Amino acid sequence: MAIVVNMPRLSDTMEEGTVAKWLKSVGDKVEEGDMLAEIETDKATMEFESFNEGTLLYIGVQEGDAAPVDTLLAIIGDEGEDVSSLIGGGNAKASEDNSSQVEDVSEEASEEIENGVEIPEGVEVIKMPRLSDTMEEGTVASWLKKVGDDVEEGDILAEIETDKATMEFESFYSGKLLYIGIQEGESSPVDTVLAVIGPEGTDVDAVLSNESGGSKKSSTSENKKVEMKSENSSEKKEVSKTVSDGERIFASPLAKKIAEDKGIDLAKVSGSGDNGRITKKDIENYTPSTTAAPAASSVVKAESNVASQPVSMALPSGEEGTEEVKNSNMRKAIAKALGNSKFNAPHFYLTIEVDMDNAKESRAQINSLPDTKVSFNDMVLKACAMALRKHPQVNTSWNGDTTKYHQHIHMGVAVAVDEGLVVPVVKHCDLLGLTQIGSAVKDLAGKARNKKIAPSEMEGSTFTVSNLGMFGILEFTSIINQPNSAILSVGAIVEKPVVKNGEIVVGNTMKLTLACDHRTVDGAVGAQFLQTLRYFVENPVTMLA
């Protein structure tokens, strides 16, 4: 019996999918677990496997076409089975066309070969991948392979900077790297030709002309010239080249960052990685060569001459200067997301001041336990999660004609990184203990700062907490991290005079400011949420029950 396979929902935000490539053809036998196709979602291109076995009788979405989730993708059944009733409401012509699809494809393929249109067997055109849910373009931070290198499936081709992190991009194919379409430091939209992999001797010009109407021909010729030059060169250099030689210095982004912080000239560092690529280890082990220092007598003489000169009364003439730095993909993504949030969502702000005396005592007792470390931020996250459970109106998302009420509570935690801000997500925070929350936040923040965090670890938040109290900020307001309905700003704990039981005593207080989207959260709802939040923060024992 024929089985209808619909376009799957491969991510939580996916509404439609594009068939990047079919791995089976009509007429092929399909086993359970076989890969049917590569489907591009709103987050990544993923392999889609079959959960059924039989013969692939019909393909409903062609390569390169997009279709909504649950659209007819394919039909699997017994060989020769009539599936016309499952296609377009029983259209006989569709069934007839489908039954002869294998022959049509073969004829079409032979025509394309004659016209030089078909991409040769074994040649793969690799596009700029979508490595995060909000990625629109990527920057090649560094190439780990060069034109002419052999590439094995699983090899890391390049490091690509998205709007959220710098990620390693691996090859799913084997062959020669025939062409590089985006050079290091350059940015291009998702789906731009990134590289071509295939057998040696492939006519890359013809492949690229099929992709972009021949616009890449001159670039390909230039790549071949570079390849020929490197092959015929009598001197093979394994270390990084200086900029003055006109060649690029190959180094990982982390190595570049550490070198910049330490003031190390990368041109003087020998790389131990592939093709002389400089790694973090090379920077850490680098010892600058000693150079002859000026003779001490010359220095003394110079100082003596300066001392004997009359003091000049001329005013210094300063020079004006401006440096323009290219915005990173992360910075542009932050600007776009927060701009949309601020301009589209009507923000309003509510501030309370909470007593932190009990929280300080409770934290000290908790941290006195072996192998236990809990921060005040962990306590705030837990309190927010419990308060959201009691006030579901705050745990929502505006969706135009509807409002989404989330049954789960995923807490976003704003983390500052070198190039901006990322928001890792602690999933099901209301179900975790304080120590579990602390471990999760520490792990995610470390990954974010080292640019090793996965896109899936930054998706799906329903509420966000931003803490600048650790920097001594007493009070501030945050922009809502959409599609959340609210974000909490956490200030510093301050020791000051407070009134308790009619007496002025020394106390510890902290200000919390809730930014709300007025489309989903009204003032009274936000105020009630803060009252509940105050209760949990001021009485930490209630969070341990």
Image: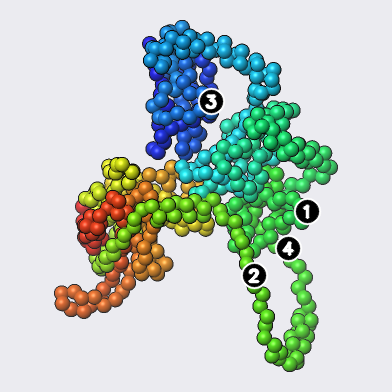
Which of label 4 and label 1 is nearer to you? 1
- The tag earlier along the polypeptide, 4 or 3, is 3
Colour pattern = rainbow
Q: Separation of disc 4 and disc 1 at Cα?
A: 21 Å
Residue at 43% of width from left, 47% of height from top? 458
Residue at 39% of width from left, 38% of height from top? 12
Q: Are marks 4 and 1 in contact (CB under 8 Å)?
A: no
Q: Residues within 10 Å of mark 1 (few under 14, many from 20)?
A: few
Amino acid at the residue labelled 3: Glu
Which of label 4 and label 3 is nearer to you? 3
Query: Residue tagged by mark 1?
Result: 245
Query: Residue tagged by mark 4?
Result: 289
Q: Separation of disc 2 and disc 3 at Cα?
A: 53 Å
Amino acid at the residue labelled 2: Gly
Q: On screen, 537 above or below 389?
A: below
Amino acid at the residue labelled 1: Asp
- The tag earlier along the polypeptide, 2 or 4, is 4
- The tag earlier along the polypeptide, 2 or 1, is 1
The dot on residue 63 is 3
